[in-house]
Image: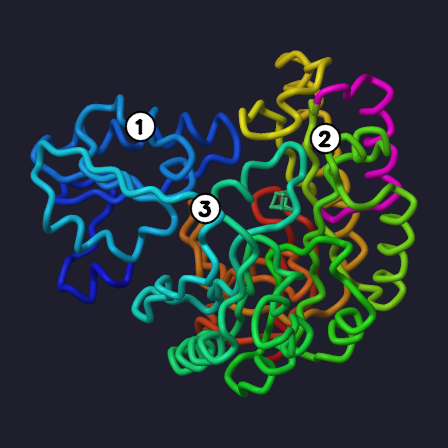
Amino acid sequence: MNFFQDKGFQIVDFNQSADIYVINTCTVTQEADRKSKQMIRKAVRQNKKSKIIVTGCYAQSDYEDLQKIEGINLIAGNGEKNSILQQLEKINRHDTVIRVNPAKYLKKYDSNLKNRSSSLRARAWLKIQDGCNRFCAYCKVPYVRGPARSRPVKDVLEEVSDLSSNGVKEVVLMGINLGTYGRDIDKGEVNLAKLISLISNFKGIKRIRLSSIELIDIDAELLDTFKRCSKFCHHLHIPLQSGDDKILNLMNRPYDTSFFYQKISLIKETIPDIAITTDIMVGFPNEDNNSFSKTINFVRKICFAKIHVFQYSNRKECLADLLPNKVDNRIKKERSKMLQRLSKELSYDFQNKFLNSTAKILVEDEIKDKEGRIYSRGVTDNYIKVIIPDFVGKKGEIVNVKLNQISSNYVVSSVQISR
Ligand code: SF4
């Protein structure tokens, strides 16, 4: 958190003993809740004299549960992150103070989180949006992050300028619902398409990537921007969640498989080398063998370049919690494994299409193997992870390579042919 550093605090590794621990929690699944609690307990054990602050989505939604954990001094909701330092000064080590307001009152984007230039890599994450208005039946996000809010354009461009001056070459735009960017500010004058064009004007920035986008937010203007903007990375992460229309409907997702297929086909026609990756949720209530088979078949039909697989977990705020026919945990695990295997197969097929072709790689860092051989490491714009043997590139350098083979550790090994 920048404001701690600005006040002279030194940031240390979480495993070290510290005076203050800040645990920024997630609550997207039950597993995330469990891990959040595990981290808090670890911090309490590491230094019994430290002050412990818990913030983020789990603090926002389950502060009553957190109160039961001994040793927490401040539980700060998502709207209270800015005031953590002021609160901290007032709190005694034996207090537990709760500062949580309902997320629905979060009306404006909170610009307090920025990249720290000293820790920047060739690629930087740039948050431009928060919150969501959609209420998918399984998702807690709208309850804990509040309504969709866009970061002011000026603020975004100032940070892009900072990043560019600090050597960042690729920005990854991130948010909860990126496609809704701009709708809530300045009468919707600058939407995501326009923001991408504005960012592309920065000479130092060579690549612009999106972290994730909902399919229904990709309209003709945005698709045209993807095609025309030479800096736009040919990679879209578009959550599908299920390949069965019955399940999509129960999930309250705003499309069916026919719409999804048609739109993805259009994107692929427009940008033929694009990598489309996705999220699939397994074990949503009422997902029977037939539903899951439909998902497998649909995933194969789309040929995603990679799949992130999630297992459904009950969230008490969400509509899906009320649905009958919950799926057994063992079945969820089996389905998850099957999809992970399929993801590997599809990733291989996607990379295989580009073997023996040339590509531009943004060099991010270098690694050594057991024998001491050096490799530069980077990614193509369509997110194929590449290592270049016996080559030490500069961080942020873009090099032309020939994609030679798919290796087990790193996806594709390659040989540099020119800078
Ligand atoms: S669109 Fe995404 S963040 Fe919003 S409710 Fe649905 S899954 Fe959650």
Q: CA distance from mark 3 to mark 1?
A: 18 Å
* Residue picked out by circle 3: 103
Name the residue at 86% across, 42% down.
Answer: 256
Q: Which residues are magenta?
A: 285-306
3D distance between C-alphas at marks 1 and 2? 34 Å
Q: Quadrant of the C terminus?
A: bottom right
Helix, strand or loop for disc 3: helix
Query: Is 298 contained in the magenta span?
Result: yes
- What label sits on residue 66 in the rendered view? 1
Quadrant of the image where one finds ligand 1: top right
Residue 374 counted in the magenta span: no
* Marker disc for residue 98: none
Q: Which is nearer the N-term, disc 1 or disc 2?
A: 1
Q: Are marks 2 and 3 in contact (CB under 8 Å)?
A: no
Please state the horizontal and vertical placement of residue 119, each as a whole percent of the image. 33, 64
* Place of residue 79 in the rendered image (x, y in percent of width and height, measured from the top left): 37, 51
